Image: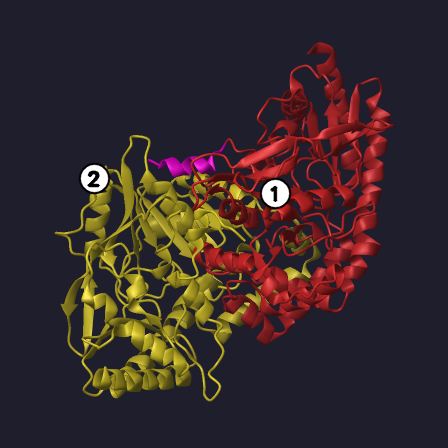
Chain colours: A yellow, B red
Amino acid sequence: MNFSNYAKHYSSQSGIVQLMEDLSVAPPQDGSLYPLGGGNPAHIPEVQDALRESALALASDRHRFARMIGDYDSPQGHEAFRQCLAEQLSSLFQRPLTADNIAITNGSQASFEVLFNAFAGRYADGSWRHIALPIAPEYIGYNDMSRQERGILKSTAARIDLLGDRQFKYGVNLSEFTVEPETTGAVCLSRPTNPSGNVISDAELSQVADRCRTAGVPLIIDGAYGLPFPGMIYTEATPFWDDNTILCLSLSKLGLPGVRTGIIVATPDVTRLIRNANAINGLAPARTGPELVLPLLQSNTLTDLLERVIKPHYLNKQVAAVDALLAAAGDLPIRFHQPNGAMFLWTWFEGIPGGTHELYRRAAQEGVVTVPGHHFFQGLETTWQHANECLRINYAGDEHTVREGIERLLLIAKRQYQQG
Amino acid sequence: MNFSNYAKHYSSQSGIVQLMEDLSVAPPQDGSLYPLGGGNPAHIPEVQDALRESALALASDRHRFARMIGDYDSPQGHEAFRQCLAEQLSSLFQRPLTADNIAITNGSQASFEVLFNAFAGRYADGSWRHIALPIAPEYIGYNDMSRQERGILKSTAARIDLLGDRQFKYGVNLSEFTVEPETTGAVCLSRPTNPSGNVISDAELSQVADRCRTAGVPLIIDGAYGLPFPGMIYTEATPFWDDNTILCLSLSKLGLPGVRTGIIVATPDVTRLIRNANAINGLAPARTGPELVLPLLQSNTLTDLLERVIKPHYLNKQVAAVDALLAAAGDLPIRFHQPNGAMFLWTWFEGIPGGTHELYRRAAQEGVVTVPGHHFFQGLETTWQHANECLRINYAGDEHTVREGIERLLLIAKRQYQQG
């Protein structure tokens, strides 16, 4: 069939399409599969049992179940869930938040599609404004979000600080990163950062937020891995929100990627826009996620699971993955980003001939699925060799699989370093 | 906050925003609420019990539940559900369909947002093509779907055939309705039609489909109320699909509006586009709907419920609503569309002073919520008085409420006819 030019926004070549397709790839004929690619969170039995209890209670209650499946939710999302979350966030941020400050979407990716286009592109004054990413690399899903005539992202290449033990850390290059009202529609950063596992410091965040507030430009914080949940932060970091901030949360990394629930915390002019977009794009968001999680939120079971189960679970996985990487690295010139958050080892194969896209391709052929780094360096104005030397490894899976996957990956990398 | 021009696509003034907000309106201080507005389907106990059984089985199966909540679905949607549905549709349409012919979305409204923009607007050859609606009035949700610089809908005003017993019926005005490759990106019609309850005949559909095929323009059939499910058709109608057709189905009117599941049946070039849009706009569709309904599809429980429970349920509601309308009509010059499908009485208040938007407003103040007709006449090039004289009444709710709501509505209409 013939498609319009608009259909080009939905290209099969998009990085996020390839990543999501890779999630369901079959193992090679003569070997095992090592799925270290997409962002599927861990299956944590204790968390799943709590959610299953919640589901059983819901399905046992004829009246609640009837409403959950049988009624459209309000287009801004589940009222009781928004109220309960607003109360908890009020005490976390020391600011009076209400249900009007919260809107539900069908996942954080859907939140960004609306927010990025509502803040970027042509303005009534004739200006063209972009979404500024203070640090590249940033989340792969931000790419391909423009529904307008050209791209809307502008990134500032990260400052790289080399650390001991094969580690490095990205920082905001504050002399390069600028926020200007005429050209910046919004600033966006993920904290923790997907893909790097970076957690930008309170001081850095405060400087970025100050620049945004001074310029009258909103700051979008992608908290998909952050605070208050799923809380996958393994360093000191203070939760942040003010009325110039749009905080995007998600239930996915708590263990619910299958039900698609995103949460936006913002001033009511923004949450109303999301409400309208929900109605126009999809009538209403799904009720499933809020219904399943509300009892856990009300009883503080969620808070308990975050500290007692989820964070230690990922930290243990991380220790095993770092062990495997260090043990297998040998004399390869590789480093990995200081893993302060999320569930990724962001690995830098310095000087690898052919780049990490080639490494990704060769590894995938042998059943080791990762994500090549260049997809995460969107919105840069100049090419950067570093972008072709990184690779994202998800360490959330089964420990043995992750360990063996990393060992195999580094063997393949070794061949590539030797033979080009 | 400052928004870009793009944010105008998400206006609070949109008809579908108002309709969805009206779904959760509170009753007036001194009276009852008669929610005859939005498209919430009926709560049918036997259907809900079957779905609840399915939910209990799912939540009792640790492994299945873990996958349902804990894994991203593939971006084209639930593989086993698509396979099972493809088998059933193959025998219904007498054509070999596979899982590749099916894509899942977060509800039919989300399907249309992608499809309409992928087929309308600017093409590579420089042409600007619209979505042609063979009959106005059509579904309110088609409006406000353009993500491009101008509107994308072009409608042909319906032919009105007056029938006995205060009824009328819309037909396709085949001398006005044209399909031209240079200006028509796709043709779209709902069958049964929301809002009118019309079911365009096999002969009319065949003529529209022929014109589409000849012009090489795809035909989008919105089967949200149609065949094979929910099957809310109370007249003879043959299910139709060919490789120039894009059939949009939904689980909502089966009783699952809260979980948001849309289904697209089309050639693989179209389902791949949907797959890409799913990944880019939201990573993957929700698994909930397919997981809950798959066992009912596999066991043919669904087919049984459609014929034995769902259709008779709505027919009974319809009979009661028509009774109430006829009994209360008195000497008002009102007619209603022949109710051949869906769950609406589309009522024509001929010559009502001030129009039905005023009637809607007055009725809402007294707790009777309906949908004013003018929202459904999008894409017409000239004004049409008929558009200001219609009102949609949802008769799916509690029979007593519907009956009393209709009586009150007609009393308010009577005052408006008398006093202007």
Nearest to the observer: residue B130 or residue B339: B130
Secondary structure beneath dot 2 equals helix
Q: Distance from label 2 to label 1 (Cα)? A: 49 Å
Q: Amino acid at mark 2?
A: Thr
* Total residue callouts: 2
Viewer-proximal residue, B177 or B293?
B177
Region in magenta: B1-12
Please name whichever residue, A331 or B189, is drawn nearer the observer in this view of the structure.
B189
Residue A271 spot, x, y in % from top left: 43, 42
**Can residue A380 be seen?**
yes
Residue A229 higher or lower than B123, as above or below: below
The residue lying at 47 percent from left, 67 percent from top is: A255
Q: Chain of mark 2?
A: A
Which residue is at the front of the view, B355 or B154? B154
Q: In the image, residue A317 lies at what x, y percent?
A: 36, 78
Tell me the number on the disc at residue A214.
2
Q: Secondary structure at mark 1?
A: strand
**Residue sitting at 40 percent across and 62 percent down?**
A13
Name the spot of residue A9 as percent of width and height, x first.
42, 52
Quadrant of the drawing holding the C terminus of chain B:
top right
In the figure, residue B390 lies in which quadrant? Answer: top right
Tell me if A164 is positioned left or right of A390 in this view.
left
- Outermost residue on the top side: it is B419
Quarter holding residue B51 = bottom right
Q: Which residue is mark 1?
A: B187
Q: Residue furthest left?
A: A175
User: Same chain, marks 2 and 1?
Assistant: no
- Are the residues flagged by discs 2 and 1 in contact, CB closer than 8 Å? no
Label 1 amino acid? Val
Seen in the image, is A130 located left or right of residue B340?
A: left
